[in-house]
Image (tube, coloured by chain):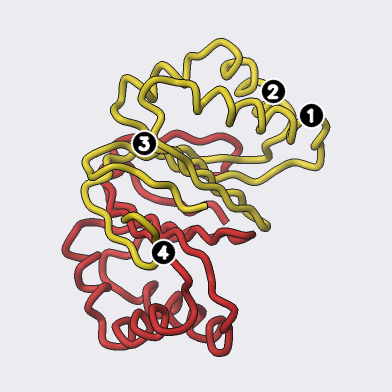
Chain colours: A yellow, B red
């Protein structure tokens, strides 16, 4: 679903990844991380899609919120498991959203 | 494929979308737009994934390059066709990439 984010400026974390062939535990952990992220202060929304490439974009109020989520204890464990097992490669980009516009969204 | 972008700062355009049920001509136009974008001055790379949601992130050297691409003549036609037929909804976010880090990528 397209995230309903507030007016810019806010932050985006673009997480692009390819998976290894070891998928055991990945879905459960991804779902738990989604739940935990939503509980974080400063979380604004997220969007996710996967075919041969996975792209997850999460939106945050500020850099401090991103830093707190990066260092959240269960997320730290998930990040280590991700590097050790599930991800073949990834790239994370921290971005300041300066402008946005949309089409066909309700309440926008 | 994960885009090989230069060191930040640079710009990202996050284009999140859902498709309508009218798909005629979409793939061909998407492929042509990808080809034309790559020829633009300031184009740095792009990443794309789709399941129920489509996410395409394109990377650019600066805001001027984004503006030129937005106003490129064939791209203008494609944008109109997109609104009129292929897209049910979309959101475009223009972002300054401030930092990035990666894992498992060659030559990084």
The residue that appears at 27% across and 73% down in the rendered structure is B69
The subunit carrying tag 4 is: B
The residue that appears at 49% across and 79% down in the rendered structure is B86
Residue that mark 3 sits on: A94
- Name the foreground residue: B77 vs A82: B77
Q: Nearer the viewer, mark 3 or mark 4?
A: 4
- Do callouts 3 and 2 mark residues in contact (Cβ within 8 Å)? no
The residue that appears at 58% across and 83% down in the rendered structure is B23
Q: Nearer the viewer, mark 2 or mark 1?
A: 1
The subunit carrying tag 2 is: A
Q: Secondary structure at mark 3?
A: strand
Q: Secondary structure at mark 4?
A: strand
Upstream in sequence: badge 3 or badge 2: 2
The numbered mark at residue A25 is 1
Instruction: From this view, report whether residue A96 is shown above or below residue B54.
Output: above
- How many numbered marks, from 0 up? 4
- Name the foreground residue: B14 vs B5: B14
The residue that appears at 83% across and 32% down in the rendered structure is A24
Spot occupied by residue B102 in the image (x, y as percentages of width and height): 50, 36
Compute the Cα span from label 2 to label 1: 9 Å
Q: Nearer the viewer, mark 2 or mark 4?
A: 4
Residue that mark 2 sits on: A81
């Amino acid at each position: 679903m397209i995230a309903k984010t507030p007016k810019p400026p806010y932050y985006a974390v673009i997480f692009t990844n390819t998976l290894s062939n070891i998928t055991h535990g990945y879905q459960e952990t991804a779902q738990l991380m989604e739940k935990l992220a939503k509980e974080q202060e400063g979380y604004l929304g997220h969007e996710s899609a996967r075919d041969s490439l996975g792209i997850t974009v999460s939106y945050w109020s500020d850099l401090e919120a991103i830093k707190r989520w990066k260092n959240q204890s269960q997320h730290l464990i998930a990040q280590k498991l991700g590097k050790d097992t599930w991800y073949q490669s990834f790239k994370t980009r921290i971005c300041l959203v300066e402008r946005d516009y949309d089409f066909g969204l309700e309440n926008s």
